[in-house]
Image: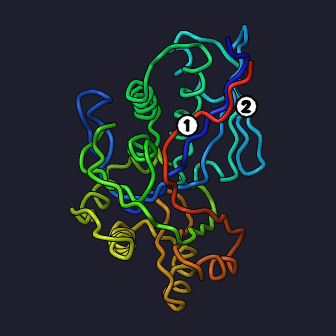
Amino acid sequence: MPASVKAFSPGHISGYFSKVVGDVPGSTGSIGAGLVLAEGVTATVERSNETEVIVVADGVETIGSPPIENVLERMGVRAFVQTESLLPIGSGFGLSAASLLATITAADELFSLSMGMAEIARSAHDIEVLHGNGLGDVAAELGGGLVCRTAPGINGVAGRLMGLEMPVAIVSLSPISTRSVLSSPDTMEKVASAYPGRSPADIDDFFALSRQFAEASGLITHRVRVILSACDDANVLASMTMLGEGVFAYGEKAAAVLSQFGIVYSTHVADAGPMILEVNR
């Protein structure tokens, strides 16, 4: 019987999206396209008499996580959980979903629950919907690549473009509350009308569609506009992170351009979804 289990889930940046409201959590979510990130969340889960959660993201430690505490209660287990990420929370990296996927994957192994990835994904997605977080991140993070989602819920992925080996660079200026955006009727009306309505053909098309969406949605701030203009001048593929006040860019020159505007988080496109990293007995 393991004493602790460590698992990993990749992160995800949406390039464009549209919210879908269903009758139940499984039919609620979003459609759109985004990049699954090789950087994400590592969760270490240990047996404990009482549930305790520590979240470490971008060097900042926070005690407690209602989504993780909620899902553990639904699973009928108590545990000490520590999640870790090099990326900041609330900046459009899908870390809420990644934290849930990594934690549930580790807890499933630790407590021999035999859930399977489909049930793990459903549990994570339901909690994401309940807490008003990223509505399409769970489905995206189940695998790697440039992912296109054409239906809400965990089975909405229509395709994944793999083999994208160039670097992904990200600069994050400040968080944007996903819940506040998703719950604003005016904002969501603009987002819905900005949705391009098709899947990208390749990485260049993805950034073109993402940029068109960012422009039409009205979400671009002045500071993001300055960074995007610099990327345009350098012929670097770039768009605004959804949802966060920041920019993500692709290619060998991306990090150098973004470094003028703040700390650059450098990663690649992931080639796989959640996985067990360690089982300690």
Q: Amino acid at mark 1?
A: Met
Place of residue 82 in the rendered image (x, y in percent of width and height, measured from the top left)? 71, 31
* Residue at the image point whose x is 35% and y is 55% from the top: 160
Quarter of the image that includes the C terminus: top right
- The front one of 16 and 206 is 206
Q: Which residue is mark 1?
A: 275
Q: Is residue 264 above or below residue 244?
A: below
Place of residue 272 in the rendered image (x, y in percent of width and height, measured from the top left)? 49, 48
Q: Which residue is mark 2?
A: 54
Label 1: few (<14), some (14–19) or many (≥20) C-alpha neighbours in 10 Å:
some
Using the rendered image of the protein, determine whether residue 69 is visible from the camera's viewpoint.
yes
Q: Secondary structure at mark 2?
A: strand
* Residue at the image point whose x is 51% and y is 68% from the top: 165
Place of residue 230 in the rendered image (x, y in percent of width and height, measured from the top left)? 56, 86
- The front one of 261 and 181 is 261
Report the Cα–Cα distance between label 2 and label 1.
20 Å
- The front one of 160 and 241 is 160
Would you identify the image quadrant in which residue 130 lies? Answer: top left
Q: Amino acid at mark 2?
A: Ile
Quarter of the image that includes the N terminus: top right
Q: Nearer the viewer, mark 2 or mark 1?
A: 1
Place of residue 255 in the rendered image (x, y in percent of width and height, measured from the top left)? 64, 76
